[in-house]
Amino acid sequence: MEDEAEFADRTEPFRKELLAHCYRMLASVHEAEDAVQETYLRAWRSWSSFEGRSSVRVWLYRIATNVSLTALEQRSRRALPSGLGAPATDLSPGVPPDDPAVRFVEPIAEALVVSDPASIVTVRESLRLALIAALQYLPPKQRAVLILREVLAFPAAEVATMLDTSVAAVKSTLQRARARLDSTAPSQGEVSAPTDPESLALLDDYIAGFENADTAALERALRADAAIEMVGTTAWFNGRVMCMQLLASAVGAPGDWRMIPLIANGQPAVGAYFKGDPYGVAVLTPTPTGLTHIHVFSTPSLVTYFGLPPTAPAPYDARGDSC
């Protein structure tokens, strides 16, 4: 019992950050949760032989990284619709990819991965959907090195120990990963934090646009180069004109939609209900000049996964006050 208590006391504080790490590696919250569970199982089995040559945190990250790398050996890259082909030229419904091996990036609730307010900014920036999708273009070992070095700031020597390689190999792998990420990742600097005033204003417009069937509010929120991605299908729409055609076809009548604000992947998001039933989650990418992306995950179970009620609640204000 003493060993169990000591193990829990020394390892549990790292559970949320390990989940964030595995999610960056795997782009799936469900697979990341499985990886963390496997990490703690392996750690417990080895606890009696842990000699303290490294910190418990470093030891756990070594296990979690290798669990994730093993998982990636059997799995294809996760993607967003914009990574699968050209944007749509009409409003034809999106269809699943022809290739059954294609899988999609999943959103993650902030509450699952943030426990320390001091680290919230760093965690949010490293979990943005576009960055998670870009990381998936890297080979697994490059992905691991880049995350461990650039996101988590582990020294090269510790990363080399975690991956059973040399410091020189870590440095060269990091250079290749940086070069490839630069060609696939979007600029991160202009994205507004979910609690910034401009983000809240854009969220207001998005929610009002759907709840009140107010297409003017939706158009006001979109930047000219905005894109909407229907995750789970190959469909994505580029440019305000095309996006507005899609949104106008979706808003229905006032009261059809109910939306609750939340934070997913360090970005403002909404849990959406249509005519009282759960619809899914939309993740917004706000900038000082408007929304650049809306990622729509039309999976009803995501509503309860994000801790929201199973049926539509009373009207809700985007800043968190009940009407």
Image: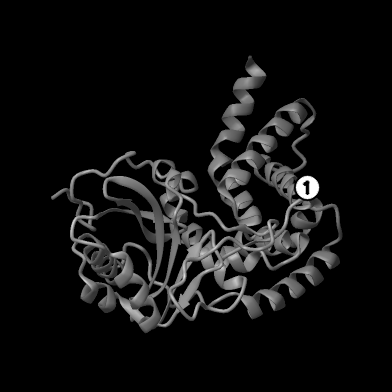
Q: Residue at x 51, y 63 (%)?
A: 129
Q: Residues within 10 Å of mark 1 (few under 14, many from 20)?
A: few
Q: Quadrant of residue 121?
A: bottom left
Amino acid marked by disc 1: Thr
Q: Report the coloring of the rendering.
A: one colour
Could you tell me which secondary element the residue under label 1 belongs to?
helix
Q: Residue at x 74, y 69 (%)?
A: 174
Foreground residue, 178 or 160?
A: 178
Q: Is residue 273 above or below residue 311?
A: below
Q: Can you name the residue that lies furthest to the top here? A: 1
Q: Quadrant of residue 149?
A: bottom right
Drawn side of residue 140 relative to residue 302, left or right = right
Q: Position of residue 96 (x, y in %)?
A: 58, 60
Q: Position of residue 250 (x, y in %)?
A: 32, 65
Asked whether the viewer can see residue 128, the reply is no
Foreground residue, 228 or 274?
A: 274
Q: Quadrant of the N terminus?
A: top right
Q: Position of residue 267 (x, y in %)?
A: 41, 62
Drawn side of residue 305 relative to residue 38, left or right = left
Drawn side of residue 25 relative to residue 291, left or right = right
Q: Which residue is mark 1?
A: 70
Drawn side of residue 301 relative to residue 321, left or right = right
Q: Count the marks: how many?
A: 1
Q: Residue at x 22, y 57 (%)?
A: 319
Q: Quadrant of residue 160?
A: bottom right
Q: Is residue 50 above or below residue 243?
A: above
Q: Can you name the residue that lies furthest to the front here? A: 92
Q: Position of residue 219 (x, y in %)?
A: 28, 78
Q: Is residue 273 above or below residue 84?
A: above
Q: Residue at x 62, y 63 (%)?
A: 97
Asked whether the viewer can see residue 95, the reply is yes
